[in-house]
Amino acid sequence: MTRSTVSTAEWMDADQAAALLGVTKPTLYAYVSRGKLVAAPGITQQTRLYRRSEVERIANQRGRGRRPREVARAALAWGLPVLESRLTLIEAQRLYYRGQSAVALAHAASVEDVACLLWQCAQADAFDPAAPRAPAATQRLVNAFAALPLPDRMPAAFTVLQAHLAAVDEQADARLLARHAGALLRLSCGAALGVAPANAPIHLQFAAAWRLNQRGADAVRAALVLSADHELNASGFVARCVASTGAGLGQAVIGGLVALSGGRHGGMTARVEALWDEVVRAPSLRAGLQARLARGDRLASFGHPLYPDGDPRAADILARLPAGGVRNTARRLAAEAEALTGRHPSLDFALVALRRAVGAPDGGAYAMFAVGRTVGWIAHALEQREGGVLIRPRAAYIGNRPTAAPAPAIVKPRGPASVFDR
């Protein structure tokens, strides 16, 4: 069996199978050695494929009678839902914001429209007030961060900027919270683009900073909408945890920004940039991709456990790329990667392709991701505040057990009889 003949609806790779089972890959391989699961050869000698129906059958069997710690571990790895939310639904490989298709919203909605949908507020309350203005000394401090990479610069700049907003307590009325949330989104945009917060629609601020034409601005608008939220991803969960402590909305956004910077999350865009640069220098795109696979490297941002048949966010953004060399390269890269691995591009790849296609500066893909996702972090923080519950899971300790200590001796006080003698 060759990988090119495998349907992703029928087969999955080791990472996907282990995630579905809630086990490590060594445990997965043990299932194969014991005959509980059959592994088929993949495109390289190092890769194996697993029939989806068999993995799901074992997962269902493991789900019955499993110990709580096993269930919890699986739940935190693409597994069972662990929190209730009315914000975002991922179902049948489609994404919905409060029941509305994210892809349909991307056709015409602005990121402000989606923000008000997720925050459940009026646009006039959130965005009619003027953008917050930072003192000159604060802006000079923000400018001093300019040499830092964007994943480091953005949380630093945002932290300084939001510190000057008036505090909003947990009992604030809905209109005041909406105004505060709108200010935070504008600060996020300013921190990402390295400009002062402005009143213009967010995607037009990107267009002005990057000197985009109308088509480029519209593509950025759609990308921001499609980046707005993605259920309980790592950064969204962090934002909820921060909000659950009673911290403010700004602190929740800071937590989200820090989590986003990791190479397995928003930092994936930098890995996609490196992949792109490497394979386009190869004799052919396929040769470049094969070289990476042969040395055991994964193709960054190809394949998503929640969208085995393709990430609808990426498909929509890639369809909006302006005609030209970048669009052609993106399509060829996606086609070659799918032929070799059966995996489709996900959001990070599409954001990088858009960044290159419109001629935005390095880090532009991360900027779109971070500003768009700020909407979701605020939405999760608002929803968590409503519940008023502290998120405090327990750890299953697997380290060394403490040694048994002798029982302390009871020492009676010297002198006359006392209550201790009774």
Image: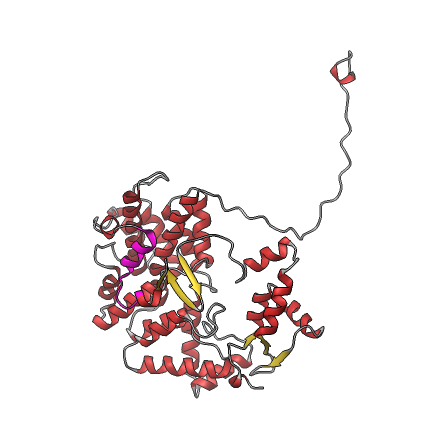
Q: Is residue 198 visible?
A: yes
Residue for point 27% across, 44% down: 175
Residue for point 60% across, 79% down: 46
Q: Which color scheme did the rendering employ for the protein?
A: secondary structure
Instruction: Give the vertical position of 103 relative to 171 (above or below).
Output: below
To which quarter of the image does residue 318 belong? bottom left
- Which is nearer the eye, 420 or 157? 420
Looking at the figure, which quarter contains the N terminus? bottom right
Among all residues in the image, which is located at the extreme top? Answer: 416
Instruction: Give the vertical position of 198 relative to 52 (above or below).
Output: above
Instruction: Estimate the x, y position of residue 188 in percent, counting from the top left.
Output: 32, 55
Residue for point 55% across, 81% down: 294
Instruction: Estimate the x, y position of residue 314 in percent, counting from the top left.
Output: 38, 72
Residue interval drawn in magenta: 105-120
- Residue 175 is left or right of residue 349, and the answer is left
- Which is nearer the eye, 314 or 266? 314
- Which is nearer the eye, 237 or 301? 237
To which quarter of the image does residue 422 belong? top right
Residue for point 33% across, 45% down: 163
To which quarter of the image does residue 324 belong? bottom left
User: Is-magenta flag for residue 170?
Assistant: no
Q: Main secondary structure of the magenta part?
A: helix
User: Is-magenta flag for residue 116?
Assistant: yes
Instruction: Estimate the x, y position of residue 70 in percent, counting from the top left.
Output: 63, 57
Instruction: Estimate the x, y position of residue 67 in percent, counting from the top left.
Output: 65, 55
